[in-house]
Amino acid sequence: MRYLIFSDIHGNLEALNALMKFVAKRRIDHFVCLGDLVGYGASPNECIQKVRSLHPLSMIRGNHDKAVMGLDSIETFNPVAAAAIYWTKKKILKKNAEFLTHLPKGPQVVDETFAICHGSPFDEDYYIFGEFDAAEAFDYLKLQLCFFGHTHFPFVYTKRDAAVDGTFLEGNSNEVKLEKGVTYLINPGSVGQPRDRNPRASFAIYDTDAHLIKFFRIDYDIEDAKAKILASALPPALADRLSLGI
């Protein structure tokens, strides 16, 4: 089986379209989205509809998905993020709102093979930033592998015996070969708003037969994405950050 693992699209249709074009040339048996279809970007409805059309699809909700649907407080969001939530609330179509409302809470198990969550296995909104956070998360894992999102950084955490290590994935192509006796927490990065100073869309493909996870970074039409944000009266900072990957 080959799984496309992607997360944090955040209303960026241009990045999502580039991803779909990329995987159209490759065999994908199952699509897996780790949450946050909306927030920040100017194309929430288009992104939801495109992801909804993927089959088979496993998906969990993100904190922005929850906030747009009133399932979570906006008080914890910074002013720019909150402004995007309010904007998205006004723009989202009823059928797409219903889709977001019924997204399951993580963690979930996909095909009895691996777990998925948005923030962490113990709290869907918790950020895993570093080995200390990862060590706590590993205590909640019952499977060898868990994919998570939320931080917008491509990262691999491993646990060998009692030792927890973290590796930030630099560059535009990486791969991880799964080893017996090692547990993994893996973030594929963000499709729509990378924050590691690499503006390219980030995602991964997991091949269960080869026990291999390949990570990719691809270009997309950033200028179009920025122009849509500015034309939609969203905060200009949301457009500026796309070029910088922050």
Image (cartoon, rainbow, N blue to C red):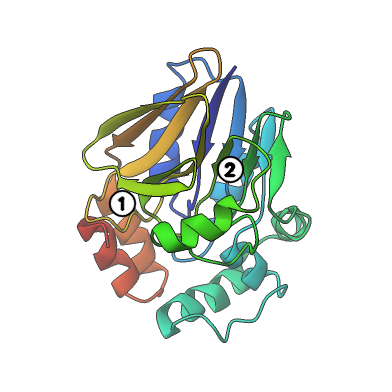
Query: x and y percent of residue 18 in the render?
Result: 38, 35
| Mark 2 vs mark 1: in front | 2
* Amino acid marked by disc 2: Cys
- In this rendering, would 31 be left or right of 22? right
- What quarter of the picture does the C terminus occupy? bottom left
Q: CA distance from mark 2 to mark 1?
A: 24 Å
Instruction: Answer few, some or many: residues within 10 Å of disc 2's Cα (few below 14, many 20 plus, some between 14 and 19).
Output: many
- Percent across and percent down for residue 211 are 49, 19
- When the figure is inspected, residue 115 is found, relative to residue 132, above or below; the finding is above
Above or below: residue 61 compared with residue 230: above
Image location of residue 130, percent across then percent down: 38, 60
- Asked whether, in this view, residue 125 is left or right of residue 108, the answer is left
Q: Is residue 123 left or right of residue 7?
A: right
Q: Is residue 192 left or right of residue 51?
A: left
Q: Residue at x 70, y 57 (%)?
A: 100
Q: In the rendered image, which residue does mark 2 sit on?
A: 33
Tag 1: amino acid: Asp
Per the image, the residue denoted by label 1 is: 224
Camera-side residue: 158 or 246?
Answer: 158
Image spot of residue 128 (x, y percent): 47, 60
